[in-house]
């Protein structure tokens, strides 16, 4: 068998990016992937197909709610779920095919099958054992269910099943008000499904800035989503394609039941390392089942590295991509680096939500003196023109030095707007640096500038 400089196990955003960078750096590289297509969870059953459904259903929402106001008369389109599914699949296919093209272009071998590591320097795929000086574990994560609840991917579904339901349900219960729950809940709410979100905590989107949590919940409620907070799900029973969910309210321990056609379990994900043989290999794990690595993504076994959802940190495709590039640089003898303080998070609801850096709550806990510059999209002409004036930009800056410490956006294109703040933070910029930068008019990005101005002498349009 051919000997490689690097074999990457897993072709998700962490693994395929690591492989491409390794190849660009002159390393002979192969990737082991057992799925029929490259791209991992993100491209096949995660970020990409969900964005297709979010886009399609947003168009429907626009037709139903805003077209007439703009003088676009006529009946709103009806939904052909089968065609919408085909559109979603075509988006997936073109993206997964794109990665295959990039592998060929970069002369990366795709070793088809599920890999294991029988010993350091060896990767087994089927009956073949390949030699590799370096191995990168990039095997990602899988949905974590709740104890006693069985996911059948028909009535009780994970995010994977939720992307391909046989038909749009009349009633859906979403367990977990995290990113998956809110994105998929939005899709079905826009398609006319009665969506109820049941969340254990007393707020949605744990870890996000409180003001963002409150604002997003209000806006989603306006779109028809119901929220039951502080509720611990006890069980889900299914019979004849229907589900009965039992939950207890944490405040008084009272028990309640809800009926639905579909229950989406969106209570988080867990690292996926099954079948790799890590225990026999002696790879150290954390107590949360993640592969333990040092600051350079090296495990305790020489020549074995790990990145992405399989290790600690936020389970985000772009965090995995950054680690993929960085570990390739390390293996090639360069200086790979990831700035974990500047990793944006985006929720692709409408409006979008984006954040980076510290929340107000974190800054308070740290006892750091800060100022908050806030600007509402109500003062942004472009947002008003497209019925998207809900939400705000909030920039948090150090009280004395004015250095930007974090930013939180609810509003149009928030997931794109956040990046000018990321770049600013990478350069250690002050809020004034952003405020003094000319922003084209009329753009949503003017709201970012206005929030930066709000950290100083004040915004113009509020
Ligand atoms: P999550 O961690 O974002 O949210 C899970 C939610 O479930 C939490 O609010 C939690 O309090 C709640 N929960 C847990 N146990 C519960 C129970 N027994 N009853 C009721 N609620 C319960 O996890 P999610 O949404 O499943 O996403 C998994 C991962 O995938 C996350 O790390 C997320 O960041 C990532 N992801 C990112 C996306 C993006 O960047 N746009 C899109 C989709 C997923």
Image (cartoon, helix red, strand yellow):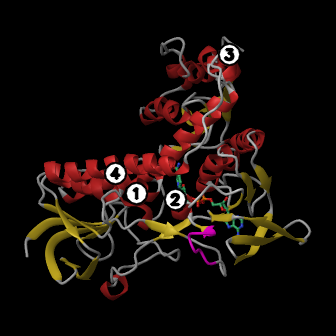
- Dot 3 falls on a residue whose secondary structure is loop
Residue linked to disc 2: 164
Q: Position of residue 166 (x, y in %)?
A: 56, 61
Q: In this rendering, is residue 105 above or below 417?
A: below
3D distance between C-alphas at marks 4 and 2: 15 Å
Mark 3 and mark 2 in contact (Cβ < 8 Å)? Answer: no
Q: Position of residue 355 (x, y in %)?
A: 57, 40
Point out the frontmost of discs 2 and 3: 2
Q: Quadrant of the C terminus?
A: top right
Please tell me how crowded label 4 is: few (under 14), some (14-19), or many (20+) other residues with Cα within 10 Å. Answer: some
Residue linked to disc 4: 93
When asked about the image quadrant of residue 37, the answer is bottom left
Residue 153 part of the magenta segment = yes
3D distance between C-alphas at marks 4 and 3: 48 Å
Please tell me how crowded label 2 is: few (under 14), some (14-19), or many (20+) other residues with Cα within 10 Å. Answer: some
Q: Is 328 on the left or on the right of 139, as rendered?
A: left
Please tell me how crowded label 1 is: few (under 14), some (14-19), or many (20+) other residues with Cα within 10 Å. Answer: many
Q: In this rendering, is residue 48 above or below 157?
A: above
Q: Earlier in the sequence, mark 3 or mark 1?
A: 1
Of the four image quadrants, the one with ligand 1 is bottom right
Residue linked to disc 1: 44
Q: Is 369 on the left or on the right of 345, as rendered?
A: right
Residue linked to disc 3: 458
């Amino acid at each position: 068998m051919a000997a490689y400089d690097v074999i990457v196990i897993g072709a998700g955003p962490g693994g395929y990016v690591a492989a491409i960078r390794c190849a660009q750096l002159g390393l002979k590289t192969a990737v082991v992937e057992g799925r029929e297509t490259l791209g991992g969870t993100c491209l096949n059953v995660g970020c990409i197909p969900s964005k297709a459904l979010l886009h399609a259903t947003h168009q429907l929402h626009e037709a139903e709610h805003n077209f007439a106001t703009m003088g676009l008369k006529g009946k709103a389109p009806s939904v052909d779920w089968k065609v919408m599914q085909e559109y979603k699949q075509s988006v997936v296919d073109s993206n997964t095919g794109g990665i295959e093209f990039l592998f060929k272009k970069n002369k990366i071998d795709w070793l088809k099958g599920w890999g294991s590591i029988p010993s350091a320097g060896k990767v087994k795929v089927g009956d073949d054992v390949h030699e590799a000086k370096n191995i990168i574990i990039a095997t990602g994560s899988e949905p974590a269910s709740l104890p006693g609840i069985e996911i059948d991917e028909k009535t009780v579904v994970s995010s994977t099943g939720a992307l391909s339901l046989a038909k749009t349900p009349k009633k859906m219960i979403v367990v977990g008000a995290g990113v998956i729950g809110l994105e998929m809940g939005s899709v079905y709410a826009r398609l006319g499904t009665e969506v109820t979100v049941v969340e254990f905590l007393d707020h949605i989107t744990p870890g996000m800035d409180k003001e963002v949590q409150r604002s997003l919940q209000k806006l989603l409620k306006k779109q028809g989503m119901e929220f039951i907070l502080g509720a611990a799900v006890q069980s889900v029973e299914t019979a004849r394609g229907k589900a009965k969910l039992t939950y207890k309210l944490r405040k008084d321990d009272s028990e309640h039941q809800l009926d639905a056609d579909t229950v989406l379990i969106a209570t988080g994900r867990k690292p996926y390392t099954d079948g790799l043989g890590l225990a026999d290999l002696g790879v150290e794990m954390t107590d949360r089942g993640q592969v333990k690595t040092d600051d350079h993504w090296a495990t305790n076994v020489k020549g074995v590295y790990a990145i992405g959802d399989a290790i600690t940190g936020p389970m985000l495709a772009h965090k995995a991509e950054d680690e993929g590039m960085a570990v390739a640089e390390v293996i090639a003898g360069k200086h790979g680096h990831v700035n974990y303080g500047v990793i944006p998070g985006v929720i692709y609801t409408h409006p979008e939500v984006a954040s980076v850096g510290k929340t107000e709550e974190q800054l308070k806990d740290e006892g750091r003196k800060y100022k908050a510059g806030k600007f509402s999209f109500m003062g942004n002409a472009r947002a008003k023109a497209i019925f998207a004036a809900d939400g705000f930009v909030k920039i948090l800056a150090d009280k004395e030095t004015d250095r930007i410490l974090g930013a939180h956006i609810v509003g149009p294109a928030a997931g794109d707007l956040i990046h000018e703040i990321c770049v600013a933070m990478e350069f250690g910029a002050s809020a004034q640096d952003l405020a003094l930068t000319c922003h084209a008019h009329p753009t949503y990005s003017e709201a970012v500038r206005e929030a930066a101005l709000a950290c100083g002498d004040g915004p113009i349009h509020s």
